[in-house]
Image: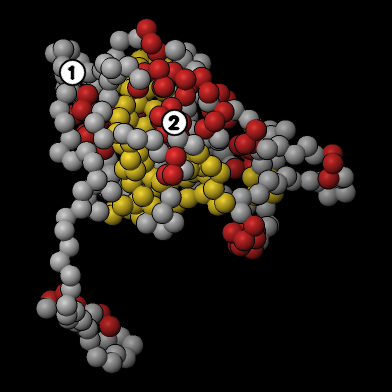
Amino acid sequence: PAPALIVGESPHAPCHWNLTHTLSDWLKQHNVPGIYGIDTRALTKHIREQGAMLGKIVPAGAAESSVPQVNPNDLNLVAEVSLKEPRLFVSHAPPRQGKDGKRMRILAIDCGIKANIIRYFMSKGVELLLVPWDYDFSGEAFDGLFISNGPGDPTQCQKTIGHLRALIERADAPPVFGICLGNQLLALAAGCTTFKMKYGNRGANQPCIDTRTGRCYITAQNHGFAVDPASIPQGWEQFFVNANDATNEGIIHKTRPFFSVQFHPEACAGPTDTDFLFEMFLRRVHGEHAEVTVSYRQPTIPARKVLLLGSGGLSIGQAGEFDASGSQA
């Protein structure tokens, strides 16, 4: 059984300067069924009420039982998308030195890594050794460990979790940084539990609060599983929290150089408000300490009076003139 695509419209005569083949051609090439002419807005409303649902496309006149039902949560999707052999990427940027004076080497576990993550590391002047999801890296020499994003249920990656657990239990463990699925895998290795969300968090405008400073960042996300904050063990704490639904968006160790986030700091094409996390990770690899590690909030002064600045009654066309009054004041 193959995945399938549902769209509202599909142009019969697409025209674009960069076009090499149509969507229909691509689907046929990869043996993926698709259907168009569906009211996707109505379908979205149904899913929003019922939660994430399994589905399948059945040809007209065929019995529903003739198309097997595939549950991606029962599959190890990471094993399907991860590379099969280690691959080394060497940056053409000026070399970034590790504590030993050599070019810094980051070992990255490929669970379905996004190309832009590789580009970010290359822009920093490091070597990136990309290894398969189940690779035993205990015999490798590296300065820092990165855990990539990826699809599916994180509990399907027991080999990865076991390797991570063995690493973070070492007294001389190097710094660790995870993104998306990497956050869930690091959390499971630390002793947390994860759960399937009803809808998942999707889109490029998810607000996340940095628990260290109380600052809110806009982030890009696409995940259906999350870490249960009630299961975070002693020594760890929440790094980021979603401002919409209060779900976990990252974990950080209080004293050791381990942290991860659920969102994508490297999102292409943005927002990249949190791409400073790459630099934070590499500074830790170099042996530096973050300025703020554990939760800290500046004391707030109770408000006694609030002055509200605004314009008076407006007619259409005047808003642009008067909306600036508050900011000018």
Distance from label 2 to label 1 (Cα)? 30 Å
On the picture, is 69 further left or further right than 131? Answer: right
Residue under label 1: 98
Q: Residue at x 61, y 54 (%)?
A: 51
What secondary structure is marked by label 1? Answer: loop
Q: Residues within 10 Å of mark 2 (few under 14, many from 20)?
A: few
The residue type indicated by label 1 comes to Gly
What secondary structure is marked by label 2? Answer: loop
On the picture, is 34 further left or further right than 76? Answer: right
On the picture, is 201 further left or further right than 278? Answer: right
On the image, the x and y values in percent for residue 71 come to 68, 38
Q: Quadrant of the N terminus?
A: top right
Q: Residue at x 44, y 18 (%)?
A: 163
The residue type indicated by label 2 comes to Gly
Q: Residue at x 28, y 92 (%)?
A: 313
On the image, the x and y values in percent for residue 234 come to 35, 35
Q: Residue at x 57, y 25 (%)?
A: 80
Q: Which mark is residue 191?
A: 2
Residue 182 appearing in the image:
no
